[in-house]
Image (tube, rainbow, N blue to C red):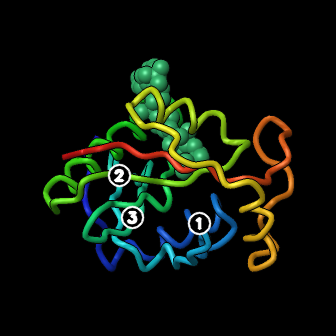
Amino acid sequence: MHIRPSTHADLETIVGMLTESWGGTTVIVHGTCYDAARLPTILAERDGRIVGMLTYALDDDSLEIVTLDALERHTGIGSALLTTATELARQAGAARIRLVTTNDNLDALRFYQRRGMRITAVTPGAVDSARTHKPGIPEIGDYGIPIHDELTLEMHCG
Ligand SMILES: CC(C)(COP(=O)(O)OP(=O)(O)OC[C@H]1O[C@@H](n2cnc3c(N)ncnc32)[C@H](O)[C@@H]1OP(=O)(O)O)[C@@H](O)C(=O)NCCC(=O)NCCS
């Protein structure tokens, strides 16, 4: 697998993947509205095909993972992208990596906690609020679980 930063030539693919996975390029986390297609992006390629991507936002203190998608699950794509994001955070002098996921996303909660991330906040009703700005956010998520709440996970990377 090859991990690389995106280039302008990848934009169409990135928009397609974000639309497929998240219903568009707008992603709302902890009340912040991101256009994920404009964020720095890391891509995973296998046999010349893009099989995963991670978008992120960097500030002085932390690297926020805004989206992470593996097109083929359980083949190491998510781990490779998370490892690269951790290296980028360290290089940028960020003290931590953080992200938000939703209460239905048991697979992601498992994945991140297995890799050292801790749940640092639960925000009841945050997805219900986000849905008023982005009505396309589904009501029902993974495993048939109603989606209401955001969970924040963090990991120190210094
Ligand atoms: C969460 C997500 C990114 C994880 O990505 P992934 O590529 O499946 O993750 P990995 O393959 O690296 O790891 C998953 C498991 O597969 C295992 N695995 C990796 N390569 C493997 C292989 N070749 N054969 C068998 N198992 C393998 C890993 O060891 C890991 O298991 P573990 O947690 O018990 O160690 C993915 O499920 C996803 O895209 N979900 C939908 C989008 C989403 O919810 N994103 C997160 C939002 S914040």
Asked if residue 136 lies left or right of residue 23, the reply is: right
Distance from the alpha carbon under mark 2 to that under mark 1 = 15 Å
Q: Mark 3 highlights which residue?
A: 56
Q: Residue at x 42, y 80 (%)?
A: 38
Q: Nearer the viewer, residue 5 or 104?
A: 104
Amino acid type at circle 1 is: His
Asked if residue 121 lies left or right of residue 131, the reply is: left
Q: Nearer the viewer, residue 73 or 108?
A: 108
Q: Nearer the viewer, mark 2 or mark 3?
A: 2
Q: Is residue 88 above or below residue 32?
A: above
For label 2, the crowd category at 10 Å Cα-Cα, with few meaning under 14, some 14 to 19 and many 20 or more, is: many
- Image coordinates of residue 12 in percent, x first then y, are 48, 76
Per the image, label 3 sits on a secondary structure element best described as strand
Per the image, label 2 sits on a secondary structure element best described as strand
Q: Mark 2 highlights which residue?
A: 97
Amino acid type at circle 2 is: Ile
Q: Which comes before the other along the chain, label 2 or label 1?
A: 1
Residue 73 tag number? none
For label 3, the crowd category at 10 Å Cα-Cα, with few meaning under 14, some 14 to 19 and many 20 or more, is: many
Q: Which comes before the other along the chain, label 2 or label 3?
A: 3
Amino acid type at circle 3 is: Tyr
Q: Mark 1 highlights which residue?
A: 30
Q: Is residue 35 above or below residue 113?
A: below
- Image coordinates of residue 50 in percent, x first then y, are 41, 54
Quadrant in the picture for the N terminus: top left
Is residue 72 in view? no
